[in-house]
Amino acid sequence: MPLHSEKRLNKLKAQLIEIAGNENVDDTTSGRLVYSYDATPNFQALPEIVVAPRTAEEVAAILKLCGETSTPVYTRGSGTNLCADTCPLKGGIVLLMKHLNKILELDRENLTITVQPGTITKEISDLVEKDDLFYPPDPSSMKISTIGGNLAENSGGLRGLKYGVTKDYVMALQVALPNGELIRTGGKLTKDVAGYDLTHLFVGSEGTLGVITEATLKLIPKPESQKTILALYQDIEAAGRSVSAIIAHKMIPVTLEFLDQDTIKAVEDFAHIGLPTNVKAILLIVQDGPKEIVDRDIHKIAEICRGEQAVDVRLASSAEEAEELATARRSALSALARLKPTTILEDATVPRSEIAAMVRAIAEVAQKYQVRISTFGHAGDGNLHPTCLTDARDEDEMNRVEEAFAEIFEKAIELGGTLTGEHGVGVTKAPYLEWKLGKAGMEVMRGIKQAIDPNGIMNPGKVFADKAKQRMVTVK
Amino acid sequence: MPLHSEKRLNKLKAQLIEIAGNENVDDTTSGRLVYSYDATPNFQALPEIVVAPRTAEEVAAILKLCGETSTPVYTRGSGTNLCADTCPLKGGIVLLMKHLNKILELDRENLTITVQPGTITKEISDLVEKDDLFYPPDPSSMKISTIGGNLAENSGGLRGLKYGVTKDYVMALQVALPNGELIRTGGKLTKDVAGYDLTHLFVGSEGTLGVITEATLKLIPKPESQKTILALYQDIEAAGRSVSAIIAHKMIPVTLEFLDQDTIKAVEDFAHIGLPTNVKAILLIVQDGPKEIVDRDIHKIAEICRGEQAVDVRLASSAEEAEELATARRSALSALARLKPTTILEDATVPRSEIAAMVRAIAEVAQKYQVRISTFGHAGDGNLHPTCLTDARDEDEMNRVEEAFAEIFEKAIELGGTLTGEHGVGVTKAPYLEWKLGKAGMEVMRGIKQAIDPNGIMNPGKVFADKAKQRMVTVK
């Protein structure tokens, strides 16, 4: 979407070159095409210019320039997000974080690591584990996603149940504001109540308030050992009950993943690791900690699963087999995506006590709208990924898919849940956001957005929908 | 400070009575006097009316009325805060949370508890422990403080090192806004990225943005066992080094408290539990978890302390003795307060690697300004409580105290720390806040405040200073 006249665009380009250097400003069609879409199906738009600043100061200078010229800014790491958050829908510039990719400091005394936003998440994980430290958040995309993207989306992952999500590990930020100022929030401090919690305001704000240019992350000691089991079920509800029962027995596993039969088949077909494809559901359960405690917990968990009608419980025989299982689970999206031209992955989330009810509701909705929805996800934290296998070229089916998901969101909220557990609002959930927050909540958010980004240059069209979606039913 | 004419005040009173009932509106001098001060020395001001709403809806209606009549609102629990946050400095009404004191739900499946703001913190703790669950935040005032106050201040406590602070346990809020709307944020959800993190914005906002009328708190399984040791030192720096060494060995104790000799003497004189008063410093160290792990950790920690020149390491022989030690530590402020007419307790906080440097700096500053400062605090999380024993009637000394603390704040920030780790900004730290956040950071905060509370009725005079304090030195 061309926003600027050619003359204005040339001037903007010259100014960007002055800030970031000639080699870091690209307005070729091929260069722009690469950043016209992200991992979200069905969204594409060309940016006018792609710029890759080298320092936080350059980021700030670019934001100042964009503010003065009303130029939209879309900050981008690896573009793995699933809500079209990095798609440049309203023209303007894509701000590429590829040069800001340094690990600045590993502080072994304070157990922190300070990184630039373009750092790949897994690099951080791998580096600290060499020192017997641990950075728990592990989004499925961690091998390619950047930490800046994780921060912008407040990414979750497989270890969320025990260890929480990205925001739980952010101690301090440097942020470039739309007015061109650089601020620092927080510190290497467990306790800090000096002012409003701006750190947590920027984390998860999806690039709509500023650009995170540096982050100090909290680390914890690396768990000494870990064990993995698979519990197999011929009854989906029994799997759901097992999840509740484990937690009610005061055990918090690291990972408690659910896969339905469709997902199991797709993953097995993709990864060939010997998953049993003749069962209705699998729970993949991991516990970590001191060896004796892990042994005790895993033994108890296996007993609970058997008591809830698991038809079999299998212990991974080695670390390699456990890793293979985790990798297979992480590949669920890719595995499902091979089956049909278009894959729409959602992440409706409910209190964990409502997992069984939600799985049932998803199946009913799929039946009602005659669409194919597989479900897998982080059952322990109530974060499910109903995944629709469809074809974007079939308009009639796509309409049914949209209605089905609207009903799934409605149901999640009715059960005390939320529209999105870890993927973000972006474009895809924006029309539904008011269902969760209410009009008054949306107004608080709009007030904050207006205060920090008065010209609306930061990731326009995201989080705040041009038009809210009507609810189909009224929730009691 | 009278803000309203008698006629307007009478009208306001009648309207408040209509909302909250005659018995819950008090404008007698004696009734107002009770709420004219809090636990902070040297701040007192009479409110015009004290009102105690019975429901969240009444709170919202009162805020709406106050917005329309530009009446300041000071929300108050037990008034235990230490930064004058509940002192009604600019006239208006004190909003008393005493009727909103119910525990609404203990959810054993999702491990949450939902409470009203007037609930006493320890009631929550005690109730959940009966169910083998655990609410970790434990501010020293927990026997009398309300959870609403803890939420408003984002209170810390003795267990912060391992378990974090109040904000780490808040999953959902109901908040009454200055415009009279009630909103809900979050949910019983580990993962929720639907919109900005308003939950964490309201927590720690010190009553300047809205009134928390309900909170859902996260619980964890209660640790199976715990052990306590005392490490005694004749060298303060050695105590500081022990703190760093314990963490560097990848152990995170629940509690790692530091007491200097002055504090030890005062506490022993107060509690008579046999603390050795002839040592320069004590570390009080607690570890919890499965019994075998606690034994192993405590053994290693004791070894580390001995290696860092602890002159003695003593194990509490029973749960009762351990509890006695923790209670003694919690009484440090009361114990010190007996020694002089005025006690000023601060909570400058530094990264834990800088504890020794900070303790040294505090001693130097006390010497320089010829004031008496004892230091105790949560060494494990870098949160120290330099406590000045003084006399508010001695103007010259009070000036020196103020200068001494300004220099202590400066030093904390220079070391990568903050003005306040857990007590809040309130009135006392407001003039210094810009030192930590910078002008641009303050502007972000002001923008948020203006967006949510455009009439400035919520706790005016707090957090945002009428006049910022000049820094004495420039930090590199």
Image: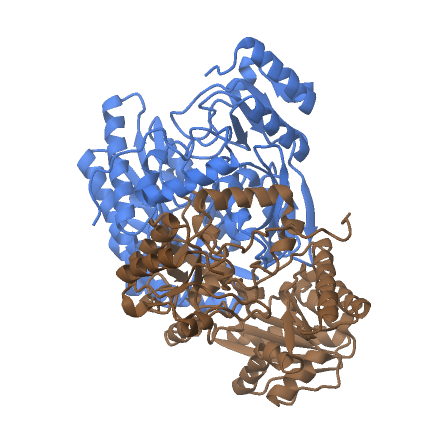
Chain colours: A blue, B brown
- Image-based side of A313 in relation to B476, left or right: left
Q: Residue furthest top?
A: A7
Residue A237 x/y as whole percent:
25, 54
- Work out whether residue A159 or residue B211 is closer to the camera in this orientation and state it: B211
Q: Quadrant of residue A238?
A: bottom left
Q: Quadrant of residue A109?
A: bottom right
Q: Count the numbered circles shown.
A: 0
Could you tell me which residue is drawn at 73 percent across and 51 percent down?
B471
Q: Check the picture and name the quadrant holding the N terminus of chain A.
A: top left
- Image-based side of A463 in relation to A69, left or right: left
Q: Residue furthest left?
A: A368
Is A29 placed above or below A102 here?
above
- Image-based side of B50 in relation to A308, left or right: right
Could you tell me which residue is drawn at 46 percent across and 47 percent down?
A157
| Residue B442 visible (yes or no) | yes
| Residue A265 visible (yes or no) | no
- Work out whether residue B142 or residue B392 is closer to the camera in this orientation and state it: B392
Is B384 placed above or below B211 here?
below
Q: Quadrant of residue A222?
A: bottom right
Residue A97 x/y as whole percent:
60, 32
Is B423 placed above or below B190 here?
below
Residue B329 x/y as whole percent:
60, 78
Residue A214 x/y as whole percent:
63, 41
- Work out whether residue A392 or residue A430 is closer to the camera in this orientation and state it: A430
